[in-house]
């Protein structure tokens, strides 16, 4: 097998000729890519590209697919230390588990949680992720450090709640000062991209929602919030405003092309039109719908209406291939079976929703998400010499239904090799895991979380003999 560490030890400028190259028109044979300065510089037929650059080193990978890295449009890096504590729990776990847990993390635990989550992202083929912001007490810098050290491209939000839902709720002027400082801190950063967030609409006044969304729009950044995810949140909004959460955001002018709405699973026909008419993007989180949601995003209808959306994990399971499979499976179960739609968008749609469409929804469309000249060289090398891809008749569909993260041989961001066969090439991931195993139990015990159910293992042990 090719030693990828040695092969890409000096990847500043070289030609890569994979067996297949995933472009906008599908997986293409006979193509090559010139990598230069961390970007895709040129794409052409292998012979033509090599003829233009006769002295350049060429890497042949005949059994690999070179594809864009996945983009996670919605995740929570500082929740990784308690990720399985929510299994089997009823909705609104953020109130009983996530807010108490994140709010109790000190600076070092925020760093460890974020680095673990970033590693999981990269192992699952995600070269970029959109973090909804940490509810910890002002430790966002350590979250950024973790992403930078692992090489994960990150859209990172500063939470701007003024009605609770975070460890700290400063005065209005301080919230706005921190928001402006966050936007300025990462302008022009090669890997970190600032964003602003309100956790849920009811965690902020209407004035704050308007101002934070407008600030994000002025800065060319993304405004994030969780909307129409659970029945109880919809009902609370109806009681408070006489409008559903998405309707209320539209009413106060907080939607627009800068807005990225997480979930939107409980959505009416009228609200679909609101999304379309405002240009608002949606993070479709299919695994979250299965594990803890009330409904399924009508993603096929969104696609037909021209509503922008991309796939997200919501911090559930970091495997880009299984995410695509879940996205397609839920559309088939929720809508396709009832209507006799046997394609449910086709394999290409879910590949696009996990890469280029996700990048565009995340505000990264001009930077990454596709293999195209001028874009950042964020890509995966997928081993096609596997039983799952043999024989291959329709690689796009096969990637959606047969792909898994263990088939990813290498992960690159900004042209740099970050992982080989799931492990980092330039830092000690096993030392990180050992430290987390040592420190997590006391941190969880100290957090004022409230679970409704015992863990599965404990419940099994308590069963009568």
Image (tube, helix red, strand yellow):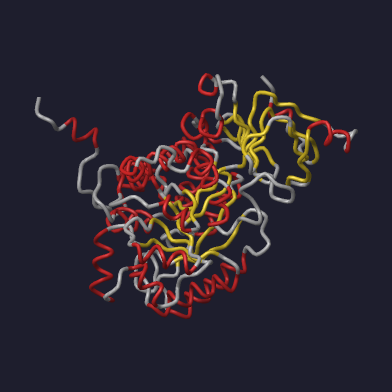
In-front residue for pair 115/305: 305
Position of residue 28 in the picture relative to residue 133 (left or right) = right
Residue 83 image point, x, y percent: 37, 44
Residue 398: % across, % down: 51, 30
Residue 340 as seen in the image, left or right of residue 34: left
On the image, the x and y values in percent for residue 123 come to 53, 36
Quarter of the picture holding the N terminus = top right
Q: In the rendered view, would you say 302 is above or below 64?
A: below
Q: Outermost residue, right direction?
A: 55
Front residue of 327 and 230: 327
What is the x, y in percent for residue 226? Answer: 39, 61
Q: What residue is rendered at 53% in x and 50% in y?
A: 129
Q: Quadrant of residue 19?
A: top right
In the image, 25 versus 246, the foreground residue is 25
Task: Classify residue 323 by image quadrant.
Answer: top left
Residue at horizontal 54 percent and vertical 59 percent from the top: 141
Between 233 and 92, the one lying in front of the other is 233
Pick the quarter of the image with the C terminus: top left
For this orientation, the residue located farthest to the left is: 464
287 in relation to 161, above or below: above
- Tell me: residue 6, above or below residue 298: above
Against 283, residue 290 (above or below) is above
């Amino acid at each position: 097998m090719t030693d990828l560490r040695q092969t890409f030890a000096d990847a500043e400028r070289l030609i890569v000729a994979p067996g297949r190259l995933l472009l906008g028109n599908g997986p293409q044979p006979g193509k090559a890519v010139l990598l230069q300065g961390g970007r895709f510089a040129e794409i052409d037929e292998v012979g033509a590209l090599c003829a233009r650059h006769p002295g350049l080193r060429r890497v042949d990978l005949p059994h690999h697919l070179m594809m864009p890295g996945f983009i996670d449009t919605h995740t929570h890096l500082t929740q990784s230390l308690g990720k399985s504590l929510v299994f089997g729990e009823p909705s609104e776990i953020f109130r009983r588990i996530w807010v108490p847990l994140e709010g109790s993390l000190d600076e070092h635990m925020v760093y460890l949680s974020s680095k673990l989550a970033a590693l999981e992202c990269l192992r699952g083929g995600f070269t970029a992720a959109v973090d909804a912001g940490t509810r910890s007490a002002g430790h966002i810098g350590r979250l950024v450090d973790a992403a930078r050290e692992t090489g994960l491209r990150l859209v990172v939000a500063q939470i701007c709640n003024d009605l609770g839902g975070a460890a700290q709720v400063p005065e209005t002027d301080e919230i706005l000062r921190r928001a402006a400082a966050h936007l300025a801190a990462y302008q022009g950063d090669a890997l970190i991209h600032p964003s602003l967030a309100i956790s849920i609409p009811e965690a902020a006044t209407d004035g704050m929602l308007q101002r934070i969304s407008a600030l994000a729009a002025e800065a060319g950044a993304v405004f994030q919030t969780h909307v129409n995810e659970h029945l109880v949140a919809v009902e609370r909004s109806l009681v408070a405003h006489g409008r559903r959460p998405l309707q209320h955001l539209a009413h106060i002018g907080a939607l627009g092309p800068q807005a990225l709405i997480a979930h939107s699973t409980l959505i009416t026909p009228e609200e679909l039109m609101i999304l379309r008419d405002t240009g608002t993007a949606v993070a479709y989180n299919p695994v979250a719908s299965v594990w803890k949601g009330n409904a399924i995003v009508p993603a096929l209808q969104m696609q037909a209406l021209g509503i922008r959306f991309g796939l997200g994990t919501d911090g559930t399971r970091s495997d880009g291939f299984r995410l695509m499979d879940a996205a397609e499976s839920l559309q088939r179960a929720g809508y396709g079976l009832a209507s006799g739609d046997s394609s449910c968008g086709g394999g290409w749609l879910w590949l696009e929703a996990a890469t280029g469409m996700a990048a565009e929804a995340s505000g990264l469309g001009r930077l990454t998400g596709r293999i195209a000249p001028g874009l950042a060289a964020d890509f995966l090398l997928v081993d096609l010499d596997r039983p799952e891809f043999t024989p291959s008749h329709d690689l796009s569909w096969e990637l959606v239904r047969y792909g898994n993260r263990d088939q990813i041989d290498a992960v690159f961001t900004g042209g740099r090799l970050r992982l080989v066969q799931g492990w980092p090439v330039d830092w000690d991931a096993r030392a990180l895991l050992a430290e987390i195993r040592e420190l997590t139990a006391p941190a969880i015990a100290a957090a004022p979380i409230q679970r409704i159910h015992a863990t599965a293992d404990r419940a099994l042990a308590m069963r009568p003999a």
